[in-house]
Every structure is written in structure tokens, then in C-alpha cells.
Image (spheres, rainbow, N blue to C red):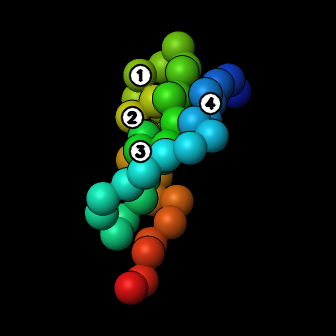
Amino acid sequence: MSKTVYLNISQITEVHHKEVQLKDVATVYCDDSAVTNKCNALRIKTIHL
């Protein structure tokens, strides 16, 4: 069975750490809390200085 995931992505976001996760730049909505937690934990960017 497929799950629908909705993202509300911020246009401007300031982060203060090198590992950027999806929860840092977007709000995730899904009926299944396990799917929501997995999506929130996704690493979307690593900033190398």
C-alpha cells in the first residue's frame, strides 16, 4: 500500500550545522508517523567548508 507524503518547503532557511536534514528546511505531513519520522531524518545536504 502506498503512502502519500506532503512537504511544505520553506523558501528561505538558515541552518547552523553541516548536516542538513529534511526537517530543517521543510514540514513533512503523512498519516503514517513512521514514514514521517523517516522522511524527517533524511539527510539532504552536507556542507563542506
Which residue occupies the extreme left position in the image?
Answer: 17
Report the Cα–Cα distance between label 3 and label 2. Answer: 13 Å
The residue indicated by pointer 4 is 7
Q: Earlier in the sequence, mark 3 or mark 1?
A: 3
The amino acid type of the residue labelled 3 equals: Asp
The amino acid type of the residue labelled 1 equals: Ser
Instruction: Identify the secondary structure beneath mark 3.
Output: helix
The amino acid type of the residue labelled 2 equals: Asn
Report the Cα–Cα distance between label 4 and label 3. Answer: 12 Å
Rendered location of residue 36, percent (x, y): 46, 30
User: In the rendered image, which quarter is residue 17 located in?
Assistant: bottom left
Task: Assess whether mark 2 and mark 1 are in contact (beta carbons under 8 angstroms).
Answer: yes
Task: Assess whether mark 4 and mark 1 are in contact (beta carbons under 8 angstroms).
Answer: no
Badge 4 crowding class, 10 Å Cα cut-off, few under 14, some 14 to 19, many 20 or more, is some
Mark 4 or mark 2, whichever is nearer to me: 4
Report the Cα–Cα distance between label 3 and label 1. Answer: 18 Å
Report the Cα–Cα distance between label 1 and label 2. Answer: 6 Å
Classify 4 as above or below 48. above
User: In the rendered image, which quarter is residue 24 located in?
Assistant: top left
Mark 3 or mark 1, whichever is nearer to me: 3
The residue indicated by pointer 2 is 37
Which dot marks residue 24? Answer: 3
Instruction: Identify the secondary structure beneath mark 2.
Output: helix
Classify 10 as above or below 44. above
